[in-house]
Amino acid sequence: MDVIQAIRDRRSINFFEPGRDISAQTMRDLLELANLAPSSMNLQPWRVIVVNDPERKKALRQCAFDQPKVEEASAVLIMIADPRAVEENIDQVLESWVRLGYIKPEAVDMYRGLAGKLYGTGDSLTRNFFAVKNTSLYAMNVMIAAKGLGLETHPMDGFDEGAVKKAFSIPGDKIVPMLLAIGYLKSGFTPLPRAYRRNFEDFVTMNSYR
Ligand SMILES: Cc1cc2nc3c(=O)[nH]c(=O)nc-3n(C[C@H](O)[C@H](O)[C@H](O)COP(=O)(O)O)c2cc1C
């Protein structure tokens, strides 16, 4: 499927075919493909927990206001934004840039300092925004790539983040921007027509906000 068609056809699917698995290879292909998403300084501050065990999906459903799709989907991806990714990944990013000729070795310290300046420190709002915005781009890539692989998705922020972190042993300093249900469209089910989208003029201006 071409990318324009995938964007046109993607919908948030409420009805998944229960009991239909996604193979480990397909899930791996999907999450690796989505990993080509762009990120701030290529720091890739995302992690994913694939929840496909029936009992664990049941537990996750309890954290997600009992939304049936959490259990009916083949899997639910817990998308995790990691504010610590700057410190954890910067060495590998800079090493690859030097090795591939993007930057000279003497520029490494300057780039390290730049990351600290641009993306804040510790648990600052700037740092948390950095983690969440990049993880959201990754999640969008998953949704489009899934469509290309014949899969359907549904992003969700209807869940208790504290409960999800507790149930899935996610450290307190991580952020869970969304859950992503993934699977196959339930047979015989046709999604309702796509709902309201704003007009171009409602959200685009030229050269200035007003
Ligand atoms: C970050 C995010 C969180 C969402 N959370 C939920 C949710 O918890 N439950 C739900 O039924 N839909 C949820 N949605 C789906 C939206 O309602 C849906 O994307 C929107 O109505 C547009 O429909 P479409 O995706 O089919 O075009 C969420 C979407 C996004 C992007």
Image (tube, helix red, strand yellow):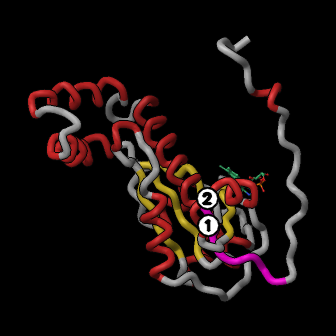
The residue wearing badge 1 is 148
- The residues colored magenta run 180-187
The reply to whether callout 1 and callout 2 are in contact (CB within 8 Å) is: yes
Residue 63: image x %, image y %? Answer: 62, 64
Residue 133: image x %, image y %? Answer: 51, 40
Q: For residue 170, what is the image quadrant?
A: bottom left
Q: Residue furthest bottom?
A: 19
Horizontal placement of 131 versus 16: left or right? left
Instruction: Look at the image and tell me in which quarter the C terminus lies.
Output: top right
Q: For residue 185, what is the image quadrant?
A: bottom right
Note whether 97 is above or below 165 in the view shown: above
Horizontal placement of 166 versus 207: left or right? left
Note whether 145 is above or below 127 in the view shown: below
Q: Badge 2: how crowded within 10 Å, few (<14), some, or many (20+)?
A: many
User: Could you tell me which residue is drawn at 76 percent across and 27 percent down?
Assistant: 203
Residue 71: image x %, image y %? Answer: 67, 77
User: Could you tell me which residue is drawn at 85 percent across and 67 percent down?
Assistant: 191
User: Could you tell me which residue is drawn at 32 percent across and 46 percent down?
Assistant: 85
**Amino acid residing under circle 2:** Ile
Measure the alpha-carbon separation of dots 1 and 2.
7 Å
- Dot 2 lies on which element? helix
Horizontal placement of 58 versus 48: left or right? right
- Dot 1 lies on which element? helix
Q: Does the residue labelled 1 lie within 8 Å of ligand 1?
A: no
The residue wearing badge 2 is 144
Instruction: Look at the image and tell me in which quarter the N terminus lies.
Output: bottom right
Which mark identifies residue 127? none
User: Does the rendering let one see residue 146?
Assistant: yes
Residue 169: image x %, image y %? Answer: 42, 65
Q: Which residue lies furthest to the front in this view?
A: 2
**Amino acid residing under circle 1:** Gly
